Amino acid sequence: MKQRLNIRALFVGAFLLALAVATTGCDTSQGGTVGGNPPEISDTDIHGEFVTLSKLKGKVVILCFWRNSCCSDRLKLMEPVYHQNKDNGLIVLAVNVGDTKESIESYAKKNNLTFTMLADEHGMISKQYGIFGFPTVLLIDRQGVIREKIPGDIPAARLEQLASVYLANTEPQQGSKTPR
């Protein structure tokens, strides 16, 4: 009986260790932290246009990591926010994790989505950002600093509110996550 408990404890310990390694990986320098600079993204979008995140400095960027299997309906709610604010310097960069460019392009066309979309078929970009749940939205201010990281659904009204705050603010933030 005692030997059976020891084997079970050993198995549970090994499982928890494997789970910790699988969810955190070996790289502890993953980006995507509030107050920090985002890791660079240099890729072609679903239309073949080259996108470089660092060249978007001066704009407010909504960076949304999503999957077709869970988040596609939420993604549609970003289009009105983008459409209303794009002339004020808002960029929406939607990074799909796991699907092909062709399927994302078809989805975008079917739903009249006009913002920039990337295919992260192998999860390399999401891993760089330490993204494990979908959707996850990051708000990057005009100075290129991550100001918000929102895992899970975000109501369109809240996204609009956050975008408006950061679009109105042209000064760098000192020690505050959200400008007042």
Image (cartoon, rainbow, N blue to C red):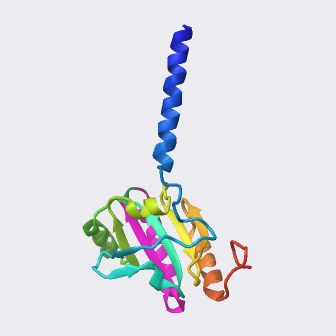
Q: Is residue 72 magenta?
A: yes
Examine the rendered structure and indicate whether residue 14 appears above or below residue 162: above
The single residue placed furthest to the top in the displayed view is 1
| First to last magenta residue range | 70-97
Residue in the image at 47% along x and 50% along y: 26
Nearer-the-camera pick, 99 or 37: 37
Residue located farthest toward the left when viewing the structure as drawn: 102
- Image coordinates of residue 135 in percent, x first then y, are 49, 61
Residue placed at 59% from the left, 83% from the top? Answer: 143
Residue most extreme to the bottom = 87
Percent of width and height locating residue 173 = 69, 80
Tell me: 175 left or right of 23.
right
Left or right position of 27 against 159: left
Name the main secondary structure of what is drawn in magenta: helix
Residue 161: quadrant of the picture: bottom right
Whether residue 101 sits left or right of residue 90 in the image: it is: left
Q: Residue at x 51, y 60 (%)?
A: 30
> In the figure, is residue 166 to the left or right of 55?
right
Residue 26 shows in the view? yes
Say which residue appears at 49% left-offset and 87% top-offset.
Answer: 86
Q: Quadrant of the C terminus?
A: bottom right
- Viewer can see residue 114: no
Can you say whether 129 is above or below 87 in the image? above
Q: Quadrant of the N terminus?
A: top right
56 or 106, nearer to the observer: 56
Q: Residue 74: say if magenta.
A: yes
Q: Nearer the viewer, residue 178 or 42?
A: 42
Residue 6 % position (x, y): 54, 17
